[in-house]
Image (cartoon, rainbow, N blue to C red):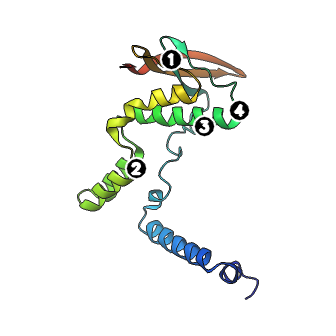
Amino acid sequence: MKNLFLYRLYTHSRAAFIFIVVFVTCYAIVFYKKMDMTLFPYNSMYTIDFNNKNTARTYGVRINGELIKFTHRPYWKKDFLETSLNGYSNYLNHGEKVFLEDYLSAKFPIGTIRTAMLMNLTPVKNTLYLWPLWFAQFAGYKVTPGAIVEIFQYNFSFDRTVANLVDSSSIYKFAVK
């Protein structure tokens, strides 16, 4: 008994023990209700196409036609910029809705619970248009009033070890005020 993790945690820190027990209990309840995505909604498990191995998609942000380059940044910053750009672009491609909205609408077709969860767990829509400005500034670019900011989607196909650009298209465009 004394070698069990929960027993050792209880003797070391009762607050941590209570937190773990409450977390596991809450997760068991939402998992039983098939709502386990509620606790971890922002992941990319729905954005990866595992069936089609010969194509890839990536995104880029342009300011006045100049592509924002961020691959020369430290790994953590490059990874953060790339991941957040993919997430925002998937949000745009999904009709400016996060996947949690679809999930909660399916689980709670009508009700105040769904409305409260949507208000507290999803981004505020009237400020999301400013995200590309934050992205540019975080990447180290200055955005001046009158600048045109665009997000491009690039589609690639793979032929053995070579990636070939199939097409690119603008999925979002606005002028900075």
**Residue 161: % across, % down:** 73, 22
Among the 4 quarters of the image, the one containing residue 81: top right
| Mark-to-mark CA distance, 4 and 3 | 10 Å
Q: Nearer the viewer, residue 133 or 104?
A: 133
Rendered view: 65 above or below 123: above
Among the 4 quarters of the image, the one containing residue 54: top right
Residue 100 is marked as 2
Residue 62 is marked as 1
Circle 2: element type:
helix
Q: Are marks 2 and 4 in contact (CB under 8 Å)?
A: no
Residue 93: in sight, yes or no? no
| Mark-to-mark CA distance, 2 and 4 | 31 Å
In the rendered image, the residue lying farthest to the top is 65
Name the residue carrying label 3. 80
Q: Residues within 10 Å of mark 4 (few under 14, many from 20)?
A: few
Earlier-in-chain disc, 2 versus 3: 3
